[in-house]
């Protein structure tokens, strides 16, 4: 049986494909106040602005391509049972070839009723005011906004607890509950952190750090895992 390799990815892996990131320190995302476009309160106040913002994000994601880090993780499926847990809403892991991808914060190419979390529907174009779900409510992006529950954190926690190898790529480990996933990983399990700036962590057993961008870091990870 293949060993279970569980990978938590954040904005840093998508940044090298040209997807801009935001930082909580300034509260801005592409020049927008995050709480205006990524919170239930922002949606209630101005749903048209929120829809326009995610319509632009959808176009941005469609225009970029997976990078070497995405392809490298997919290639590891020949040797390992690879599970990707991503904080990213893009589909670059899937387009890069990964077959087991869990999106913690939703997906840009899906939409749902503003009342019900399920079902979700594929969307490649724009969502507009007046576009209704079967239950008669406005359609919204199937994205987990600030202040909303993270439904996929339970299965993600189980994956972390079952990992034979755990890897973190391109995330500051500051956004919870995703940042807490590493706490579910058994002490005996090797843990690799790949980032341009390694986040400050309490002393963790079997921790290896690779202070590089995602593309170069995954290349090094592949070399280490094949030794």
Image (cartoon, helix red, strand yellow):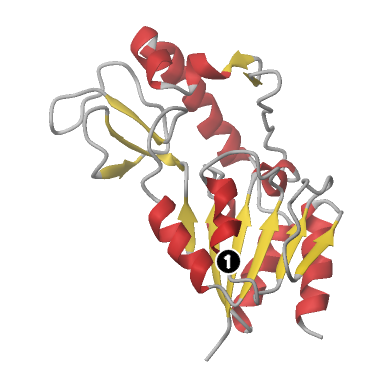
In the rendered image, the vertical position of residue 91 relative to residue 159, given as above or below: above
Residue at the (24%, 43%) spot, across then down: 118
Residue at the (51%, 33%) spot, across then down: 58
* Left or right of 34 on screen, residue 197: right
Residue at the (42%, 38%) spot, across then down: 124
Instruction: Residue at the far left: name it.
Output: 135
In the rendered image, the vertical position of residue 134 relative to residue 82, given as above or below: above
Q: Secondary structure at mark 1?
A: loop
In the rendered image, the vertical position of residue 43 relative to residue 20, given as above or below: above
**How many marks overall?**
1
Q: Quadrant of residue 12?
A: top right
x%, y% of residue 127?
36, 26
Question: From the image, which quarter does the C terminus lie in?
Answer: bottom right
x%, y% of residue 36?
50, 14
Q: Quadrant of residue 19?
A: top right
Instruction: Residue at the far bottom: name it.
Output: 1
Residue 96 visible in this rendered orientation of the protein: no
x%, y% of residue 84?
55, 61
| Nearer the observer, 135 or 172 | 172
Residue marked by disc 1: 185
Instruction: Residue at the far top: name it.
Output: 45
* Left or right of 219 on screen, residue 83: left
Residue at the (73%, 68%) spot, across then down: 205
x%, y% of residue 191?
70, 67
| Nearer the observer, 96 or 26 | 26
């Amino acid at each position: 049986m293949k060993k279970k390799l569980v990978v938590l990815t954040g904005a840093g892996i998508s940044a090298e494909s040209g997807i801009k990131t935001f930082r909580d320190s300034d509260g801005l995302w592409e020049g927008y106040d995050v709480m205006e476009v990524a919170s239930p309160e922002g949606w209630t106040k101005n749903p048209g602005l929120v829809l326009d913002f995610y319509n632009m994000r959808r176009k941005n994601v469609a225009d970029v391509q997976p990078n070497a880090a995405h392809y490298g993780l997919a290639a590891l499926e020949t040797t390992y049972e690879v599970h990707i847990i991503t904080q990213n809403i893009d589909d670059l892991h899937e387009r890069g070839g990964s077959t087991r991808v869990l999106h913690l914060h939703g997906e840009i190419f899906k939409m749902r009723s503003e009342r019900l979390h399920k079902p979700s529907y594929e969307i490649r174009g724009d969502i507009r005011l007046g576009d209704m779900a079967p239950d008669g409510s406005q359609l919204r992006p199937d994205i987990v906004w600030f202040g909303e529950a993270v439904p996929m954190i339970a299965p993600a926690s189980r994956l972390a607890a079952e990992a034979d190898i755990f890897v973190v790529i391109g995330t500051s480990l500051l956004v919870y509950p995703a940042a807490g996933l590493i706490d579910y990983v058994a002490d005996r399990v090797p843990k690799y952190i790949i980032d341009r700036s390694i986040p400050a962590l309490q002393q963790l057993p079997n921790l290896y750090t690779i202070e590089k961008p995602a593309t170069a870091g995954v290349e090094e990870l592949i070399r280490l895992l094949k030794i």
